[in-house]
Amino acid sequence: MKNLKRNMKVLSLCLAAVLCSGLAFGQTQSQLLNQLKNQGTSSSEKKENDSSDKTKIDITKFSNVKKTGVSEDSNLVPDAQVAMSREDYPVTAGDIYTLAFSVGSSPVTYSIPLDSSYKLRIANLGVINAKGLTFLELKEQVTKIVQKNYPMGGVQFVLTAPAVFTVSVTGEVVETVEKNIWALVRLSSFVDKSFTDYSSLRKITVQSADGESKDYDLFKAARYGDLSQDPFLRPGDKIIVNKIDRKVAVDGAIRRPGYYELLAGENLKALIDLYGDGLTPFSDLSRIELSRLITEKDSAGEKVYLNKENYENDFELLCYDYVEISSLADLSPHVFVEGAISDGVTDETVKLENSNVSKKISFSFSEGEDYAFFIRKNKDILTEVSDLQNAYIIRDGEKIALNLMPILYDATYYAKVEMKNNDTLLIPFKQFFVSVSGAVYLPGRYPYIPDRTWDYYIGLAGGFIKEKNAGEAIVITDVNGKKHKKSEFIQPEMMIEAKANSGLYYFNQYAPIITTILSAVSTSISVLAVTGVIN
């Protein structure tokens, strides 16, 4: 019981020491965050406009650069709890540890900083060479030494403050810098924001403090999870980012399209099988298109068309080559839908502004598919101005009428109109105008307003010309030429003709002519009478 009380007392003192040390470390952490923020660099991303109309490939897409400056990722901030929770935290020069145990009834607490010699002195009990050890391995050795001398000592050994140290990065980077980090920062996190458009991910050299150099491949680390290629950085490390040798792109019917840096000896087959992760079930190796930006033949680049034989023979690729693998789906038959349709714009304002603009969209389909299923499947392309009743198909110069209304709104309707390659389904715009002509002041076309009668549109046209029109005589006809009564509401595209039927108007029009003729006749008679022609 006495020993239990003594051990509890030692444990409480140990925890108090840890808390006090943690408070001091909190200040160091804050200072480090500010330091990391102050070290951030700003630099414009480099861009090259070497693309051409011939290849239409933007060279800037090959860029590694996302943004420059020091990352403020949380893994750059030292955290003692994180360090002690991992089995692989490496003991690092600059770490501060707290050791607590009891000697008889007296508690003993030590704060033990570790210098670059990696010699950790355990009170007056011994010295441990901590170089190359993890925290758990060091803790095990410390515990054994203390328990050997004080079997009932209740040993407690904790990491109070992880070390902060300096690592530099040079080579093909935005700028050469030194950054303060801690022992759980990997190479990829450190260099990520320093890349330029020409930085290599496949060969990054790390020179350790003892002069040893080793190259690492961050692609292997990212693709395959090979963390041996993405090591934790150590005090005194110098990172050298090398330049790319070849960077190429693959797109189209490939499992992993993207931009990849090839190693020596790797070409088209490696790009497709290794980097692109293989072909899709729809890949067409008979149609491989290579856009080559850099060529001696033409400064604008060139197109090279490859096939399965080129793939099997591992066609040689150059830097900035862009490979596109065609899909068998591209060979499917197509129809075109044109006219009053939507192109998929979801913004209602934009959709409204473009509602009267004719569009043309291509659709692939399967052999045997008919227009009823096609229209129901793609009904979202129809708009409020689509004239569904008067749509038609243009096929080899022939027009085939197709009423879309029953297709869309009658579940029992079935009309077998099979789709053919290169058909054009034309959907007219629904017209929303009324034409006014004849004896009005302003004849023309006027916007249709529902539930209005003829007098509304005559009013828009300035009213009747009374000298021409008598009794408000009008003729109302629809687009099919059918006449309608004045009592009916006017419908879109109806025509209202104000008749010029005033007898007085016609009399006034021809009276001067008649008067002139009569005057001429009277004059002639008078002349003849004077000359004696008329007795």
Image: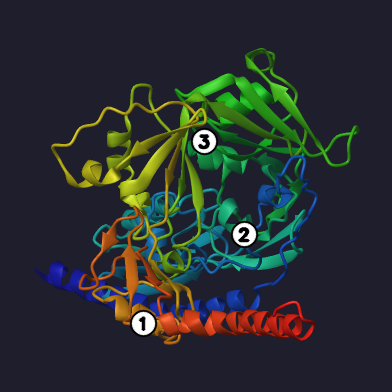
Against 254, is 100 above or below?
A: below
Q: Quadrant of the N terminus?
A: bottom left
The amino acid sitting under disc 2 is Lys
Q: Earlier in the sequence, mark 3 or mark 1?
A: 3
Q: Indicate which label's residue lies in the foreground, 2 or 1.
A: 1
Is 157 placed above or below 396 here?
A: below
Residue 456, quarter of the rendered image: bottom left
Q: Which residue is mark 3?
A: 256
Say whether residue 117 is visible: no
List x then y, in percent, for residue 425: 43, 39
Residue sitting at the far left: 1
Task: Work out which residue is located at the far right of the displayed protein and give it.
Answer: 296
Q: Is residue 496 left or right of residue 187?
A: left
- Location of the C terminus by quadrant is bottom right
Q: CA distance from mark 2 to mark 3?
A: 20 Å
Q: Percent x, y for residue 208?
A: 69, 50
The earlier-in-sequence mark between 2 and 3 is 2
Q: Residues within 10 Å of mark 1 (few under 14, many from 20)?
A: some
Q: Position of residue 33 (x, y in %)?
A: 53, 77
Quick check: can you spot residue 253?
yes
Q: Label 1: which residue?
A: 470
Cβ–Cβ below 8 Å for labels 2 and 1?
no
Check whether the beta carbons of the residues at disc 2 and disc 3 lie within 8 A of each other. Answer: no
Residue type for callout 3: Arg
Q: Image point 40% across, 76% down: which residue?
A: 501
Identify the residue shown where x is 35% and y is 71%: 448
Closer mark to the observer between disc 3 and disc 1: 1
Q: Residues within 10 Å of mark 2 (few under 14, many from 20)?
A: few
